[in-house]
Image: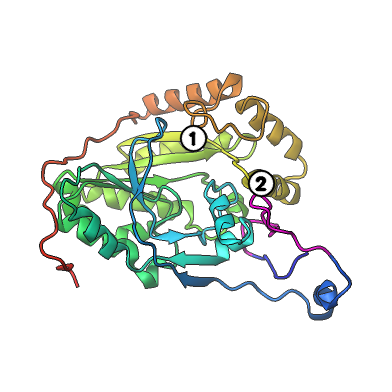
């Protein structure tokens, strides 16, 4: 039953997750069943809860990813991208992957201290740390919490390699850190551009910066000497795929060094949320969109298997890949990776952060 206004949010539902045996509320005749008709729907406000994890570096052994460790300063993301594959993680907190994911956020203010402890461990093996792999490190609450910045300050201080993936132009505010790191050869940035159409993005990514701001960020980062890439992710058939060539061209004009793409993924609770979003915003083509996605995913809404989950399979996947490669060749945007230096790393000095 709806209990709040979802105006301005990406998800159009806030159903209780059932994967972990949580019971979804059903009408039982009490006053809660009438709250909407009696009081209307109150506006959902964004809340931030402090999270105190014992460690901050997440490890993975996926053959599909170009990194083996990452840091997520925040849990949940106010950008509200309906397709976000991180939405199901909110179920671990007994919260909905729907509107809760984009309005009930968690911040990790001790992230830099935990990272300091990890980098100080004897025998620590250096490899690039990826930021922005689960939720955006430059979502709006970074404005006040500045957790991402504190992490970057430590990474620069220790000359530790890192990458950033974001769809926010707020990344430019940390150029005083990212720029010097790039000159040392230890930093690279990917800016996600899903569509160039603000009308599409108003429901697809309702609280993310406009595409012109992201392209401006690519330009500013590139001019500052930061290796910057465009990530066309996800590509959504019948919704954004027709813009593939235009996005590559715009990114090239902004100075991007390379480009990547990923077909849309709909794991776990994301699939029903995405289907509901289609029904509300694109009812004329909802069935066609899902049929095409299923053709990319072996007949299912989602393909979780290694090697195919990031690329898709079948004729549609091959068509998108071919178009993307032709566009990249035309605009001289290779699908290359910048090797980041590992030999400059200096373990943190002392038991306490020198930064604070």
Which residue sits furthest bottom? 39
Indicate whether 243 appears above or below 73: above
Instruction: Check disc 2 and report its element: helix, strand or loop.
Output: helix
Task: From the viewer's perspective, tell me whether residue 131 is left or right of residue 325.
Answer: left
Q: Whole-percent x and y of residue 10?
A: 62, 56
Label 1 crowd (10 A; few <14 / some 14-19 / many >=20): some
Does 16 appear in magenta? yes
* Disc 2: which residue: 274
The reply to whether the C-beta atoms of the residues labelled 2 and 1 are less than 8 Å apart is no
Does residue 139 appear in this view? yes
- Farthest right residue in view: 29
Residue 319 quadrant: top right
- Magenta stretch, overall SS: loop
| Residue at 64% in and 32% down | 293
Q: Quadrant of the image for the N terminus?
A: bottom right
Q: Earlier in the sequence, mark 2 or mark 1?
A: 1
* CA–CA distance in space, label 2 to label 1: 17 Å
Q: Is residue 175 visible?
A: no
Measured along the vertical axis of the image, is residue 291 above or below residue 193? above
Q: Nearer the viewer, residue 318 or 214?
A: 318
Q: Position of residue 214 (x, y in %)?
A: 41, 52
Which secondary structure lies at badge 1? strand
In the displayed structure, would residue 140 be above or below residue 296? below
Residue 262: which numbered mark, if any?
1
Between residues 327 and 161, which one lies in front from this camera angle? 161
Residue 168, numbered circle: none
Q: Start and end of the magenta stretch?
A: 8-26
Q: Does residue 64 appear to the left or right of 316 in the view shown?
A: left
């Amino acid at each position: 039953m709806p209990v709040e206004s979802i105006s301005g949010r990406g998800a159009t539902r806030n159903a209780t997750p059932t994967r972990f045996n949580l019971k979804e509320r059903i009408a039982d005749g009490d006053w809660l069943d009438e709250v909407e008709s009696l009081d209307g729907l109150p506006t959902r406000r964004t809340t931030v809860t402090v999270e105190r994890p014992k460690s901050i570096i997440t490890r993975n052994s996926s053959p599909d990813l170009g990194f083996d460790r990452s840091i997520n300063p925040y849990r949940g993301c106010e950008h509200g991208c309906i397709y976000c594959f991180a939405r199901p993680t909110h179920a671990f907190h007994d919260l909905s992957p729907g509107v809760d994911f984009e309005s009930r956020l968690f911040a990790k203010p001790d992230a830099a201290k935990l990272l300091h402890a990890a980098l100080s461990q004897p025998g620590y093996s250096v490899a690039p740390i990826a930021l922005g792999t689960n939720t955006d490190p430059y979502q709006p609450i970074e404005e006040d919490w500045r957790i991402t910045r504190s992490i970057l300050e430590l990474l620069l201080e220790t000359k530790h390699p890192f990458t950033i993936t974001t769809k926010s132009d707020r990344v430019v505010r940390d150029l005083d850190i990212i720029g010097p790191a790039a000159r040392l050869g230890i930093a690279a940035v990917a800016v996600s551009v899903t569509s160039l159409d603000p009308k599409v993005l108003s429901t697809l990514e309702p609280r993310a910066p406009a595409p012109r701001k992201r392209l401006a960020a690519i330009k500013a980062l590139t001019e500052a000497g930061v290796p910057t890439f465009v990530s066309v992710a996800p590509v959504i058939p019948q919704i954004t795929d027709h813009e593939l060539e235009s996005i590559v061209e715009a990114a090239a004009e902004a100075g991007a060094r390379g480009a990547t793409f990923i077909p849309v993924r709909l794991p776990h609770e994301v699939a029903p949320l995405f289907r509901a979003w289609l029904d509300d915003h694109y009812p004329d083509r909802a069935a066609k969109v899902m049929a095409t996605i299923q053709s990319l995913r072996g007949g299912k809404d989602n393909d979780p298997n290694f090697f195919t989950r990031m690329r898709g399979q079948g004729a549609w996947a091959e068509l998108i890949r071919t178009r993307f490669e032709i566009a990249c060749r035309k605009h001289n945007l290779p699908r290359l990776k910048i090797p980041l230096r590992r030999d400059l790393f200096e373990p943190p000095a002392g038991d306490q952060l020198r930064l604070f």
